[in-house]
Image (cartoon, rainbow, N blue to C red):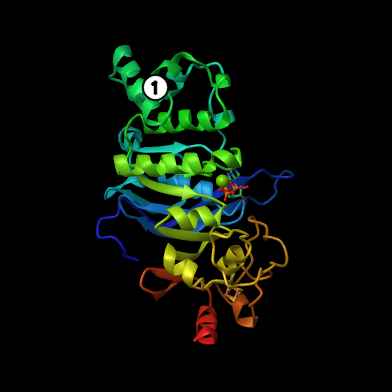
C-alpha cells in the first residue's frame, strides 16, 4: 500500500481494544475491539477523510495518530519516525506538530478561562514563551481565524457556536502544526455556519500547508474537501483510496449503502437508497467471516467463511469484499 513516497503519516496494522468491566466476579476478560488491523497513509498537504457509522472506531483511530490513544499492536510513523516507539519526551516534541479540533466547541472550551488562557494553552505546555510573546501570538492567531486581538480578554460565553469553534481552531493552530485532526468539526454547529468554518479550515490549510485527518458523517462534505478517504465499518477498513475513484465507483456494499443515503444535490448518485438490514454487531463478540455479514444485501455462504482481505481493484482504490468484482462485472 504505497501511494506516497514520503507520507507524513503512515499506519501499519493498527489494533486497539478496550477492556470491558466484569459483570460478576471471575467472569472471563472481555474486550471491545475498537480498531482491527487498519493501515493507511496520508501525504503531506492532503485532506484524508475517515467515514463510517457511529461507534465504528473513527475517533479511536484518529487518537492513535496523535499518540493520545495507545495501540495494542501495529506501528505509526510520523515524518518517518515511529510514534508508537517514542518515550514521553519524544512524544511531547512530536506533538508540537500535531493538534486536534474538537467536535463540540461548547464543552471543549472551559467557560472560566479567558480566550487568551485557552488559545495560549499549547504555548504554555510547550514552554519557553514570555507572556508578551504569547499575547502577540494569540492576537495574530485570533485575527487569522476571523476574530480580533481584542477578543482575547473575553470569555467563551460571549461568543456564538461558530465563533467558539474559531477559538478552538486558533488554539489548535497556535503552534503551527503540520497535522490536524478534525473530528466532526462542524456537526455540533448551526447549519448556517458550516460552510464558513469549512472554508476557514481550507484557507488555513492552504496558507500553512497543514495535513488534515477529517472525520465526518457528511459524505457530501467529504467528497468536496478530501483527497483520499477510508470507509470504516466495525473497526475495519472496507474501502480506501482516492476519493474521486471511490465516489465514481463505490465497490464495497457498505460504501454503496452509505452513499445511497445522501440526500444532497451535491452528490450525483445513480444508486437507489440501500436500506441496511440488522444492527451493527457487538464489538465485544466479533462474528466470524466478513464483519458486514448480517447487514449486507449481497452476502452469500462464502462471506461467513473468513474475513475478506483488502485488495487493490485499481490504482489507489482498495476494497475488502469477496464479491467486489460482481458490481464491476455487472456494470461492464
Ligand atoms: N475509552 C473507552 N473505553 C471503552 N470503550 C471505548 C472507549 N472509547 C471508545 N470505545 C468503544 O470503541 C468503539 C469505537 O468508538 P469510537 O468513539 O472510536 O467510534 P466513532 O466512530 O468515533 O463513533 P462516533 O461517530 O459516534 O464518534 C465503540 O464501541 C466505543 O463504545
Ligand atoms: S464479503 Fe460478503 S458480506 Fe462482506 S461485504 Fe462482501 S458481499 Fe457483503
Ligand atoms: Mg467519534
| Mark 1 CB lies closer than 8 A to ligand 3 | no
How dense is the environment of label 1, judged by Cα within 10 Å: few (below 14), some, or many (20 and up)? many
According to the picture, the residue beneath numbered tag 1 turns out to be: 120
Q: Quadrant of residue 159?
A: top right
Residues 266 and 73: in front is 266
In front of the other: 113 or 191: 191
Up-down relation of residue 314 to residue 164 (above or below): below
Instruction: Point out the quarter of the image occupied by ligand 2.
Output: bottom right
For the N terminus, the image quarter is bottom left
Residue 78, image x and y in percent? 31, 47
Q: Is residue 260 visible?
A: yes
Q: Is residue 48 above or below residue 92?
A: below
When asked about the image quadrant of residue 203, the answer is top left
* Left or right, 278 with reference to 72: right
Residue at (60% x, 81% y) in the render: 302
Regarding mark 1 in the picture, which secondary structure is present there? helix
Amino acid at each position: 500500500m504505497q501511494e506516497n513516497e514520503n507520507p507524513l503519516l503512515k499506519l501499519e496494522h493498527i489494533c486497539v481494544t478496550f477492556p470491558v468491566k466484569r459483570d460478576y466476579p471471575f467472569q472471563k476478560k472481555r474486550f471491545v475491539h475498537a480498531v482491527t488491523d487498519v493501515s493507511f497513509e496520508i501525504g503531506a498537504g492532503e485532506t484524508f477523510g475517515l467515514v463510517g457509522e457511529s461507534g465504528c472506531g473513527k475517533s479511536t483511530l484518529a487518537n492513535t495518530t496523535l499518540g493520545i490513544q495507545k495501540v495494542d499492536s501495529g506501528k505509526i510513523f510520523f515524518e518517518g519516525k515511529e510514534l508508537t516507539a517514542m518515550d514521553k519526551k519524544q512524544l511531547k516534541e512530536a506533538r508540537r506538530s500535531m493538534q486536534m479540533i474538537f467536535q463540540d466547541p461548547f464543552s471543549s472550551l472551559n467557560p472560566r478561562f479567558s480566550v487568551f488562557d485557552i488559545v495560549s494553552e499549547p504555548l504554555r505546555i510547550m514552554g519557553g514563551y514570555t507572556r508578551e510573546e504569547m499575547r502577540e501570538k494569540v492576537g495574530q492567531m485570533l485575527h487569522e481565524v476571523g476574530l480580533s486581538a481584542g477578543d482575547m480578554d473575553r470569555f467563551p460565553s460571549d461568543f456564538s457556536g461558530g465563533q467558539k469553534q474559531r477559538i478552538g481552531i486558533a488554539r489548535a493552530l497556535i503552534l503551527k502544526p503540520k497535522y490536524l485532526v478534525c473530528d466532526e468539526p462542524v456537526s455540533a454547529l448551526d447549519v448556517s455556519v458550516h460552510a464558513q468554518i469549512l472554508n476557514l479550515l481550507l484557507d488555513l490549510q492552504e496558507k500553512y500547508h497543514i495535513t488534515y485527518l477529517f472525520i465526518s458523517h457528511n459524505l457530501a462534505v467529504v467528497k468536496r474537501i478530501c483527497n483520499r478517504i477510508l470507509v470504516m465499518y466495525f473497526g475495519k477498513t472496507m474501502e480506501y483510496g482516492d476519493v474521486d475513484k471511490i465516489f465514481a465507483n463505490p465497490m464495497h456494499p457498505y460504501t454503496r449503502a452509505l452513499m445511497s443515503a445522501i440526500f444532497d444535490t451535491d452528490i450525483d448518485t445513480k444508486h437507489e437508497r440501500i436500506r441496511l438490514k440488522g444492527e451493527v454487531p457487538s464489538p465485544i463478540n466479533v462474528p466470524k467471516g466478513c464483519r458486514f455479514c448480517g447487514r449486507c444485501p449481497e452476502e452469500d455462504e462464502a462471506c461467513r467463511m473468513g474475513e475478506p482481505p483488502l485488495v487493490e481493484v485499481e490504482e489507489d482504490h482498495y476494497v475488502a469484499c469477496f464479491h467486489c468484482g460482481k458490481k464491476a462485472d455487472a456494470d461492464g
